[in-house]
Image (cartoon, helix red, strand yellow):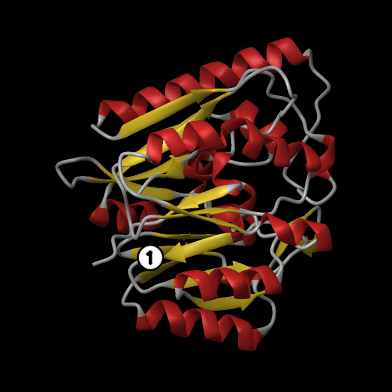
C-alpha cells in the first residue's frame, strides 16, 4: 500500500545561498534586499541548521548533503525541485527552468543514488524535455496525493503539460491540472509552483481555492479532494503570500505525524485552521525569513522526501 508520508528526508546545506537572478523572472516571492552576500549566507545557514535540528529532534531521519562553492548554485537549498523519490523504487529526475539549477542535479545525483542505494532504485530521467524548453520542477510543480495516485499541477512556465503527461505515464498517476494566480500589490500573476498554494497530507489538504479563477477547474479540484476523503483547509490569497500553502507532513519511526511549516506560515494561519491541522498531526515551525525572502521558497521546498 502506498504511503503519503515518510520518516526520512534529504536536505542540502547551503554554502553560497543568495538571490538567484535566473529564477526571479517568474518567482514573485524572491526579494533582493542587496545585503552583503556573506551575511545572507550566514543567516540562511543558521535558519537551515535550526530547522534540521527541529526535524531530527522528533525522530525523523535527515540526510544532509553539503553544497559546494563551485559550480555556483544559489538555490541548492531547495532539492525537491529536481528529483522525487517513490515507494516503488522509482527516482525521477526533472527538467529545470533555470540553467544554474540544472547544475544541482550534476552535483548531487551521485550522493542521492548512494543514499538511495540501500534499496533497489529505477532512475527515470525527464531532463530531455529541456531541449524543447519544457519543464516540470519536481514536487514544487507537482503536489502528490501518493495514496490515491493523484498529481495536482498548476500549469506555469515551470510546469509543462507535456512533461506532466509523461510523468503520469511513467508512474500511473492521474493528473488534475489547473491554473492558479497570486495577488501581489493588487496584480494577479501566475503562480510558478503548485506547492505555493497547495499541500496534501494524510487527512487534510491546504489549498487556496480563490487562486484558481476558472470555476470549472476549481470545481474539478474540489471534487477530487472530496472524493479522496481529505478535509479542505481553504486559505486566502493573502495567506499564500505568507507561505501557508507550503507545508509538508512527515512521520517519525513510531508513526507520530508532524506538519512542517515556516514561522511566517504558522503566524498566517487562523486559530481554527491550526486546530484542524493539530487534529491530525503536531505542528513544527521554524523561522526561515532570510531563505523565504531571498529564495522565494519555504519549508516544504527545503525538504525532499525519501521513500
Q: Is residue 69 above or below residue 143?
A: above
- Dot 1 falls on a residue whose secondary structure is loop
Crowding near the residue tagged with mark 1, few <14, some 14–19, many ≥20 C-alpha atoms within 10 Å: some
Q: Is residue 179 visible?
A: no
Residue drawn at x 80%, y 42% as measured from the top left: 99
Query: Label 1, on which residue?
Result: 146
2 and 23: which is toward the camera:
2
Residue drawn at x 68%, y 34% as measured from the top left: 75
How many tags in the picture? 1
Q: Is residue 189 above or below residue 22?
A: below
70 and 180: which is toward the camera:
70
* Quadrant in the picture for residue 191: bottom right
Quick check: 226 left or right of 267? left
Measured from the top left, where is residue 83 in percent x and y? 55, 48
Residue drawn at x 55%, y 86% as measured from the top left: 219
138 and 156: which is toward the camera:
138
Image quadrant for the N terminus? Answer: bottom left
Measured from the top left, where is residue 56 in percent x and y? 31, 27
Residue drawn at x 66%, y 68% as measured from the top left: 163
Quick check: 4 left or right of 289? left
Measured from the top left, where is residue 270 in percent x and y? 44, 53
Measured from the top left, where is residue 216 in percent x and y? 62, 89
Q: Is residue 13 above or below residue 224?
A: above
Q: Residue furthest left?
A: 254
Q: Is residue 53 above or below residue 214?
A: above
* Quadrant in the picture for residue 227: bottom left
Q: Is residue 53 visible?
A: yes
Q: Residue furthest bottom?
A: 216
Amino acid at each position: 500500500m502506498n504511503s503519503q508520508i515518510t520518516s526520512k528526508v534529504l536536505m542540502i546545506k547551503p554554502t553560497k545561498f543568495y538571490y538567484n537572478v535566473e529564477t526571479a523572472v517568474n518567482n514573485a516571492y524572491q526579494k533582493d534586499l542587496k545585503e552583503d552576500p556573506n551575511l545572507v549566507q550566514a543567516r540562511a545557514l543558521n535558519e537551515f541548521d535550526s530547522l534540521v535540528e527541529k526535524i531530527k529532534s522528533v525522530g525523523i531521519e535527515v540526510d544532509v548533503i553539503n553544497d559546494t562553492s563551485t559550480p555556483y548554485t544559489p538555490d541548492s537549498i531547495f532539492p525537491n525541485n529536481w528529483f522525487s523519490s517513490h515507494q516503488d523504487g522509482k527516482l525521477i529526475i526533472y527538467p529545470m527552468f533555470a540553467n544554474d539549477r540544472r547544475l544541482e542535479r550534476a552535483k548531487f545525483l551521485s550522493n542521492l543514488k548512494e543514499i538511495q542505494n540501500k534499496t533497489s532504485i529505477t532512475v527515470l530521467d525527464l531532463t530531455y524535455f529541456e531541449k524543447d524548453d519544457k519543464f516540470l520542477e519536481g514536487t514544487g510543480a507537482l503536489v502528490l496525493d501518493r495514496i490515491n495516485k493523484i498529481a495536482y499541477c498548476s500549469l506555469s512556465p515551470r510546469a509543462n503539460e507535456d512533461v506532466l503527461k509523461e510523468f503520469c505515464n511513467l508512474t500511473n498517476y492521474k493528473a488534475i491540472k489547473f491554473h492558479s494566480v497570486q495577488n501581489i500589490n493588487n496584480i494577479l500573476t501566475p503562480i510558478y509552483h503548485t506547492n505555493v498554494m497547495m499541500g496534501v497530507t494524510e487527512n487534510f489538504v491546504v489549498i487556496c481555492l480563490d487562486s484558481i479563477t476558472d470555476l470549472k477547474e476549481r470545481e474539478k479540484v474540489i471534487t477530487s479532494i472530496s472524493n479522496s476523503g481529505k478535509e479542505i483547509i481553504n486559505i486566502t490569497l493573502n495567506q499564500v503570500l505568507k507561505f501557508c500553502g507550503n507545508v509538508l507532513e512527515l512521520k517519525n519511526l513510531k508513526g507520530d505525524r508532524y506538519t512542517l511549516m515556516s514561522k511566517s506560515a504558522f503566524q498566517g494561519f487562523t486559530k481554527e485552521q491550526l486546530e484542524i491541522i493539530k487534529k491530525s498531526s503536531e505542528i513544527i515551525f521554524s523561522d526561515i525569513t532570510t531563505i523565504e525572502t531571498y529564495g522565494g521558497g519555504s519549508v516544504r521546498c527545503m525538504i525532499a522526501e525519501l521513500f
